[in-house]
Amino acid sequence: MPIKKVRSHISPNEALLFERSSPGKKAYQLPALDVPAVDPRDALGAQNVRAEIAGFPEVSEVEAIRHFTRLSTWNYAIDHGMYPLGSCTMKYNPRVNELVARTEGLAWAHPYQPESLSQGAMEVMAHLESALCEITGMDAVTLQPAAGAHGELTGILLIRALLEKQGNPRKKILIPDSAHGTNPATAAIAGYVVENIRSDEQGLLDLAALERSVTEDVAGLMVTNPNTLGVFESRIIEAAEVLHRKGALLYMDGANMNALVGIARPGDFGVDVMHLNLHKTFSTPHGGGGPGGGPVAVKKPLEPYLPVPRLKRDGVRWTFNYGCPLSIGKVKAFYGNFGVLVRALAYILAHGGNGLRAATMDAVLNANYIRKKLEPYFDLPYALPNMHEVVFSDERQARLGVRTGDIAKRLIDYGFHPYTVSFPLIVHGAMMIEPTETEGKLELDLFIDALISIAKEIETEPETVKTAPHSTRTSRVDEVKAARKPVLKWTPASP
Amino acid sequence: MLEACGVESPEDLFAHLPEAVRLTRPLQLPPGISEYEIVDYFRRRGEETAGGCASFLGAGVYRHYRPVLVDTVVARGEFLTSYTPYQAEISQGTLTTIFEFQTMICQLTGMDVANASMYDGSTALAEAALMSARLSSKGGLLVARSVHPEYQAVLQTYAKNQGMPITEFGYDPETGMADLDDLERKLNDLTAAVIVQSPNFFGVVEDVTRAAEIAHRRRALLVMAFTEAVSLGLLQPPEADIVAGELQSFAIAPSYGGPYAGIIATREKFARQMPGRLVGETTDTHGNRAFCLTLATREQHIRREKATSNICTNQALIALMATVFMSVYGKQGLRELAEQNLAKAHYLAGKLKPRFSGPFFNEFVATADQPDGINAALLDKKIIGGLPLGRFYPELSDAMLLCATEMSRREDMDLVADAIVQATPALVPSPCATGVRG
Amino acid sequence: MYPENYRYTKEHEWVHVEGDTGTIGITDHAQHELGDIVYVDFKYGRETLKPGQHVDQGKTIGSVESVKAVSDIYSPVSGHVVDVNHTLADTPEKLNADPHGEAWLVKIRLSNPGELANLLSAADYQTYIGAEK
């Protein structure tokens, strides 16, 4: 089957900045000083003044713009096409969000400027807090955590603080074996021991195992819902009851909220505390790996422990309240990734209640469409209805010597970014696919056709798949060499 | 599509959800609004937030000019809307810029290896402290009182749950520098790390070398934090074991507190204990130079509960802004920029009475009676004055922290100085008050 | 493939006893599962593993890393560390090439030779890994 989505094109080569550099080139221009110059050695003391910054590049403006532009052409991005990455929710990043984040008063606001001059920024935060409460069905929100993992840490620290106040922080956090790696890592940093809970044969939380495991030593359970298979944990309410009976709490990783917004609210099914990923569900751009935003939403009992400061209405004005004696303190300097919060609020304003719900419907429809079309070709390890994402296994293809990683690489030749490879760990050779609501039928069909074509290639010419990609300017990289002999910066001796 | 799914309406796809969990009413949010209305909403919020004021606030967030090239580059969809570079073949743009970033941070800090950025300076410092504990197998932290108070607060939050006791050591009320004698008294064999910031919260440059000597004598690590990255253009790279800093000054808009980008940089021998993403150089199957994420086995997605950190995101786009900034200014420009900052702040200090005699870069503490009253008067002239320090340091309630950068205009500095002098009768501006150090 | 005179564990370590000293390594099965090995770390608790260190059977004495995975190494026997194979720092690939010989990890002077009775013979180990598949 001919590849329809992409065709070869020449792309520019480009050296590193240091290799383009030569003394005397400049891309900057500073205004003349309107005050007397000061000799650094006099002002700072000779021992405090550095020699030149050895190796630091010097390039012209044209070289700089060409450098970054050329490098950018080596990237795949949402603006090019679909990212079927499961659990990443790679939806379109609305451009209006970029514009409003740069609104002068907001972009140049200093976190310590007088509150009387910050009402607009505070209103933005308050508005977002309120919208997120409504969406999650929770009672209070902190916008301080910088990313999902940071939000998880905040959430677990909140649990610890509440239990400590009750006299015993307890020792363990229960985590399903299907969980994202940040979950156990977070629990460990929060000072808890992790105990894994196996999923049952349907891929769901094993309630019997949970009942056996929840003791007075357990502080809580971290659950993702829908889980990392894209399946809704149908017995979540019972799970919450099991925990609450023993005084433990239910934490929900909100990475998969794109399946729930407007349909179901975690606060309504027993969740005590959860985090959201603004860079997933709420469309803020990934930017090659960050920034993100990881607000945490809680039920009333946890509210007193939220990080300071908390936004408070004081008559007709907003003010920051630092008088929270039970607060866990701060998880980050200042108030949170405000610029990301602006983008998330813009997304919510654009959609409105109905629009958000419609987006969820489309996301789930798209994932189910993909599932139905690919089921004849790839193994579906768990048969339950999936929501916004679907997880296949490479079982069938593995018998012919081709694994999920190879299929993913071959997908690149077809013009797509790979799906999530080898996660969750409970599926052997996982292929985790999440299209999001952004993709229309055209793009989805191209994706489906590509995978079907690859499935056929595996039967007739498996080597093509195993050595893919073939059409990228960079072929498979030697990760082993990179790990054995790490070269983590440029030095003049580098090739 | 519905047909392919074997359902009649999209609602059917949710039929399997238990009744009890379903939201049976619409979300109580106003209907979606148009692009124009969104822009207008934020325009109004912007107007309700100080615009067009000159500002002399520093204290961890700095007002520096953002070269136009920065937003031009990060606006490109290939950078803005791309994902974490796990698939190296189609992410060489991002990977290459991160490699350049790591290199430049090493050049600036004098360290051997730097990671691909942390959430911000405060969490970078907290992670550096955890890293010291892992490296030294000890738990105590000795933190200078002159470290940014909010950074100290974040450190508390992280350290508490790792059983890492924090002890504060003071600063010299004359010089404003960390009291290293106090450090020596409080240091013991259980100390994992000594933490100082330079320039410190008061803007004063610390004697990091001596602090490191003291720390090393007790087999503790020296962790140095910085909040004003431009200072690296002029100041001697520190004799630290780990550097944790904030890059907001490198073309990252203040944006009411975030998003920013922190870094951790360290010596080669400590690299495997470093949290966060790392990009390394390698080759592809054709022998071409290529870059990829590496040493991933430190990270959460592999080690899970034994990971060096739970961090997943790095601040890639923010780090890219800093990379473009560093490319625009370059070796000479960064130096010149730093020298301008030095000149501006010292001009302002020359008209006032700096509280401390220690050397300072672009921030200093000025004695000022009734700092809130002074700031109110300045606001009428559309100037945001310095940070009244009483909120963090009760012993300094008659002082404010002033920052001047290349964006500060002489006439505004004159107004600030006048306002402070007028309100502070004891003030005798000394022509030598430029923090000269022999 | 699996030397008859070695003893094996279910965690895929082997021990070869000569006199009162046991040489420890990971099995061929282990290196194959891990893929290209990039790094070996020798640690007991939080300390680097050193000669003289006492280790208990079943406790972690370090870890082996490939690009995508980390595996802890558990000591098959109790005793005092006599030697650690630091050449693996420069050439971790030896673990893939010769896991039962040149790429030994640690030598231990046994404190309780009776423990060997709990370990698997070559035949039992091969049955075990056959069953695992």
Image (cartoon, rainbow, N blue to C red):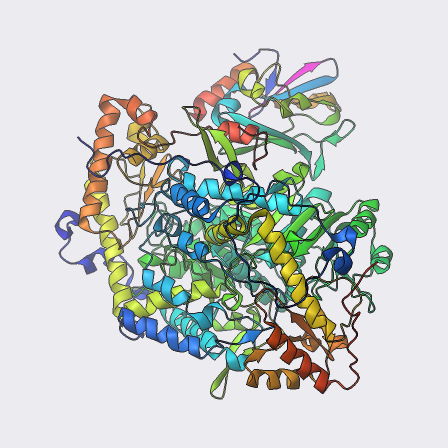
Judge whether B177 appears above or below A415 on screen. Answer: below
Q: Decide if residue B345 is on the left or right side of residue B288.
A: right
**Residue C32: where, in percent of width, then height?**
48, 22
* Displayed quadrant of residue A235: bottom left
- Is residue A424 in view? no
User: Would residue C14 be counted in the magenta stretch?
Assistant: yes
* Displayed quadrant of residue C115: top right
- Is residue A371 in view? yes
Give the total of numbered labels. Answer: 0
Task: Tell me which segment is drawn in magenta.
Answer: C11-18
Q: Nearer the viewer, residue A20 or B295?
A: A20
**Residue C111: where, in percent of width, then height?**
76, 24
* Residue that lies at the very extreme toward the bottom in this rendered image: A315
Judge whether B328 appears above or below A262 on screen. Answer: above
User: Would residue B38 be counted in the magenta stretch?
Assistant: no
**Residue A280: where, in percent of width, then height?**
38, 56
Q: Decide if residue C64 is on the left or right side of residue A432.
A: right
**Residue A444: where, in percent of width, then height?**
21, 46
Q: Residue at x 67, y 55 (%)?
A: B225
Q: Residue at x 31, y 57 (%)?
A: A259
Q: Nearer the viewer, residue B55 or A31?
A: A31
